[in-house]
Image (cartoon, grey):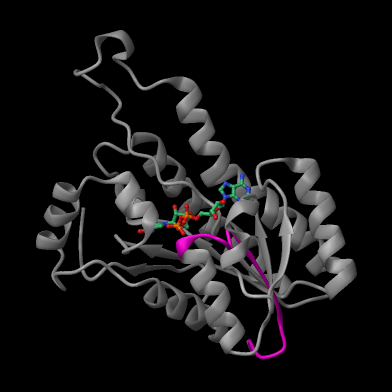
């Protein structure tokens, strides 16, 4: 698929990875639309991007906003589901007898932002792709934690489900001309990583990564672009993790 001239929607486009993906797709000629909740970060987004503020976990907001985007900018051909939230919390917390077990509300809100959002945005976008007879491409941003990262019970479960959703949709939508893939980053040097993990943990991760460093946001962005550009890649979960296994 030719990125040049395509309308690309990047959710979470004000974040560490999303803003880089938006920049990269734009540098390849895409007309980039950003969707994010966080208006306070909007200063960091260059004027060249079209920005919509809506909550990707709210079904009505998603449906209405995607409809508006399509109406105002034309059919979305590339969707990057990048909105998400890294969360570190163990299933059992022996250090906190008052709240020994992972709080169910926390588990549910993790599912909502990391999994339900992908379903909702993809569903509305694909509906318009089909109505407009667009041969599109969807890239979900998963995580190495999908393999089951100790201390990230809810986040890992949500990302594993994103992988399953990706593969399932690739099978259902491939015959309709819509490809669905995921990029599964390892640990990338973004603010969200340093906020979610201690310095000691990050050092430990680096020492276990064969390439001996954190990834760069642009390395994730290049993987996204390569999945979009290659018309025979479908149903792939592409690891971008420096060879780290967990
Ligand atoms: N940074 C990493 O090392 C890393 C590694 C693996 C996977 N990921 C995944 O990459 C994605 C982006 O991560 P990041 O590091 O850029 O995080 P980030 O926190 O910098 O960016 C996430 C963005 O999503 C937006 N967002 C959150 N909830 C939203 C909602 N309900 N509606 C609309 N927007 C919402 C936030 O405002 C933010 O701008 C996430 O899905 C994350 O799980 C990140």
Residue at 65% across / 42% down in the picture? 57
Say left or right for 196 vs 218.
left
What x and y, as percent, mark residue 153? 34, 35
Q: Does the magenta stretch include residue 18?
A: no
Residue at the extreme top: 98
In depth, the one of 224 and 50 nearer the eye is 50
In the rendered structure, the answer to whether residue 93 lies left or right of residue 237 reads: left
- Judging depth in this view, the residue of 237 and 56 nearest the camera is 56
Question: 164 or 182, which lies in front?
Answer: 182
Mainly helix, strand or loop, the magenta region? loop
Where residue 69 sits, quadrant-wise, is bottom right
Quadrant containing the N terminus in the rendered view? bottom right
- Residue most extreme to the right: 71
Q: Percent x, y for residue 192?
A: 39, 52
**Residue 18 falls left or right of residue 64:** left
Give left or right: position of 165 versus 217. Answer: right
Tell me if residue 125 can be seen: yes
Numbered marks: total: 0
In the picture as drawn, the residue positioned furthest to the left comes out as 207
Compared with 95, 133 (above or below) is below
For the question of whether residue 74 can be seen, the reply is no
Rendered location of residue 16, percent (x, y): 46, 62
Q: Quadrant of residue 14?
A: bottom right
Residue 97, compared with residue 12, is above or below; it is: above
- Give the residue drawn at x 61%, y 83%: 26
| Residue lying at 75% horizontally and 61% vertically, measured from the top left | 125
- Give the residues drawn in magenta, as a range: 2-16
Q: Which residue is drawn at 65% across and 61% down?
A: 172
Image spot of residue 32 (x, y percent): 68, 76
């Amino acid at each position: 698929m030719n990125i040049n001239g395509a309308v690309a929607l990047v959710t979470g486009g004000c974040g560490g990875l999303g803003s880089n993906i938006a920049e990269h797709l734009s540098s390849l000629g895409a007309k980039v639309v950003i969707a994010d909740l966080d208006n306070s970060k909007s200063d960091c987004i260059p004027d060249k991007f079209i920005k919509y503020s809506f909550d990707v976990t709210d079904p009505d907001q998603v449906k209405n906003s995607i409809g508006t985007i399509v109406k105002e900018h034309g059919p979305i051909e590339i969707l990057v589901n990048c909105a998400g939230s890294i969360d570190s919390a163990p299933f059992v917390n022996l250090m906190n007898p008052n709240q020994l077990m992972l709080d169910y509300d926390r588990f549910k809100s993790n599912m909502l932002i990391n999994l339900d959002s992908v379903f909702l945005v993809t569903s509305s976008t694909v509906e318009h792709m089909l109505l407009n007879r667009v041969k599109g491409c969807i890239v979900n941003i998963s995580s190495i934690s999908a393999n089951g990262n100790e201390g990230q019970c809810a986040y890992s479960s949500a990302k594993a489900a994103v992988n399953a959703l990706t593969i399932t949709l690739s099978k259902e939508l491939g015959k309709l001309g819509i490809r669905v893939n995921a990029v599964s980053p390892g640990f990338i040097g973004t603010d969200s990583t340093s906020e979610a993990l201690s310095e000691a943990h990050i050092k430990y991760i680096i020492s276990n990564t064969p390439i001996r460093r954190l990834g760069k946001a642009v390395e994730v962005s290049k993987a996204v672009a390569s999945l979009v550009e290659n018309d025979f890649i479908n149903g792939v979960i592409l690891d971008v993790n420096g060879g780290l296994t967990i």
